[in-house]
Amino acid sequence: MSEDKRWDGLTITRELPVGVYFGGVRHKQFTLRAGVTGDLIVAQEAHPDGPMQLITLEVYRRQLLSLGDIELKYLTTDLLRDELLETDLAVIADADVELEKKLKPQSAASKPGAASSTTSPDTATG
């Protein structure tokens, strides 16, 4: 299987505390790619009357490039719904947030040594 170069620099790899049981094995290591606009659209189309948790799970399933040794064709929303523990889902959600922060451009004000154009209430004089 060849690696998809379009996700270079746009992924994060972490490990689930418990893992998804599949094929007699718990699969823990996962790689999550950055979300794209279509992830949410497709998830909402697939589950138009579904609860937000199901739509969120579908989005994460689409973002997962790998989960242990599970072939992507078997990495279904149903498998995740049946086997993914809440604690593991929280780790995936945290990885998604971490990835978003990593990809967010730093503003000039957040760079070390940059002068701030705002006055802090702690340093303001009246």
Image (spheres, rainbow, N blue to C red):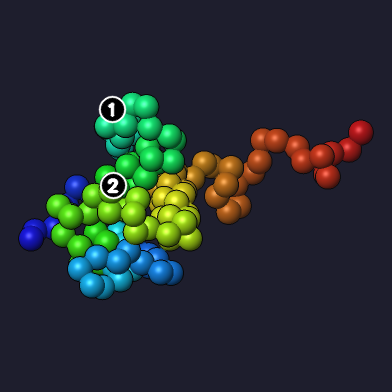
Which image quarter is the C terminus in? top right
Q: Quadrant of the N terminus?
A: bottom left
Disc number placed over residue 45 in the picture, else none? 1
Q: Is residue 37 above or below residue 97?
A: above
* Mark 2 surroundings within 10 Å by alpha-carbon count, few (fewer than 14), some (14 through 19), many (20 or more): some
What percent of the width, then of the height, locates residue 60? 34, 47
- In this rendering, position of residue 85 left or right of residue 40: right
Q: Amino acid at mark 2?
A: Thr
Name the foreground residue: 34 vs 42: 42
State the image coordinates of residue 65 (x, y, percent, origin top left). 24, 54
Q: Kindly report the distance in space between the C-alpha atoms of the residues bearing marks 1 and 2.
A: 14 Å
* Residue 30, image quadrant: bottom left
Res 64 visible: no
For residue 90, say whether it is visible: yes
**Kind of element beneath mark 2:** helix
Q: Which residue is mark 2?
A: 77
- Which residue sits at x=32%, y=42%? 58
**Residue occupying the point 70% across, 35% down:** 118
Residue 91, percent from left and from top: 45, 59
Mark 1: secondary structure? helix
Residue nearest the viewer, comparing 6 with 27: 27
**Mark with earlier residue (1, 2):** 1
* 56 vs 105, nearest the viewer: 56
Q: Looking at numbered disc 1 in the image, what kind of residue is underneath it?
A: Glu
Q: Give left or right: position of 124 versus 4.
A: right
Q: Residues within 10 Å of mark 1 (few under 14, many from 20)?
A: few
Residue ID at (43%, 47%): 100
Q: Residue furthest left?
A: 1
Splitting the image into 4 quarters, where does residue 125 fall? top right
